[in-house]
Image (tube, grey):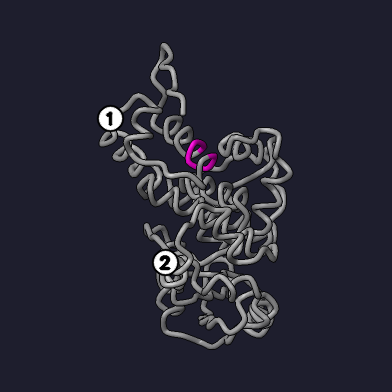
Amino acid sequence: MQREVAGSKAPSKAELVKRVCDFLKENSTSRVTLATLGERFCLSPFHLQRTFAEVMGMSPREYLEECRLSLLRSRLASGEPVVNALRGTGYSAQSWLYEDSRRRLGMTPATYRKGGAGACVGYAIGDSPIGRILLASTDHGVCSVKAGRSDAELLKALVAEFPRAEIAKSDGAKNYLDTLQNHLRGQEAKFPLDIRGTDFQMRVWTALRLIPLGETRSYQEVAEMVGKPRAVRAVANACGSNPVPLIIPCHRVIRKDGSLGGYGMGIGRKRALLAKERGLAA
């Protein structure tokens, strides 16, 4: 692994962390230590970890694990045998992953590969600035957020999304919904998420969470944020497949010409959300 050569101008924290993220993603199946990162980026391990956590909200080790798990999820979802998927993503101890898989994947690898059959999904429905919303969660975090005209419409959409799961109202989902409602009023909030996506989708969704309240970015700018400046259409598709809008704020992404573009919850709701957030940020 080669060291980065320092230029005439030190990178900003965001630029540095982006480089570290790219390196970790490229080496997600390898053992990468803080010492390795420090040598690679010509920084002390302590300074690098502190800067990374400040920008990303997690340690480099935790981010590396997320990258590895994202790759594992993708392989399992494509039907790859569990043992092969484990080996291909750098896990050397199959028993260790199975013992810890409920915390990490929300279900065992075999169950995940079968589409989550037998998983328990709780939900709650309530009001919001854009109408009725439904929030669904597992024991591991929020897995879906939807907006609709009626409670029946929302529940029907949830059942269609998780046709093999056991679905019922839950206090856990209600607590998350209360937090989300306060979040939409301008309160800071963090949510554990139990969502599935490709590596690229996860990169886009992480970038969206960095867009400040009251601001927007173009699809082109988001593509540049994830290091794929030509992947504008893929960014739009990732926004459209976001399972937890309002938490991952894909409504803050617009077209380069300033027009709103698409939104899974409807353009009217996108316009209303952006107007409300501009008022909260003023």
Measured along the vertical axis of the image, is residue 21 above or below residue 3? below
Residue at 61%, 60% (x, y): give it: 84
For the residues marked 2 and 1, what is the alpha-carbon distance in whole angstroms? 31 Å
User: Which residue is more in the foreground, 278 or 96?
Assistant: 96
Mark sitting on residue 122: none
Asked if residue 213 is among those painted magenta in the image, a careful observer would answer no
Report x, y in % for residue 190. 39, 60
Residue at 44%, 77% (x, y): give it: 139
Report x, y in % for residue 67. 51, 50
Asked if residue 25 is among those painted magenta in the image, a careful observer would answer yes
| Picture quarter with the C terminus | top left
Quarter-wise, where is residue 15 in the image?
Answer: top left
Mark sitting on residue 96: 2
The amino acid pointed to by label 1 is Ser
User: Which residue is more in the foreground, 278 or 225?
Assistant: 225
Res 274 visible: no
**Magenta segment:** 22-26
The amino acid pointed to by label 2 is Trp
Decide whether the magenta segment is chiefly helix, strand or loop: helix
Measured along the vertical axis of the image, is residue 107 above or below residue 280? below
Element assignment for label 2: helix
Residue at 46%, 78% (x, y): give it: 173
Report x, y in % for residue 253. 61, 46
Mark 2 or mark 1, which is nearer to you?
A: 2
Cβ–Cβ below 8 Å for labels 2 and 1?
no
Crowding at label 1, few (<14), some or many (≥20) Cα neighbours within 10 Å? few
Element assignment for label 1: loop
Mark sitting on residue 44: 1
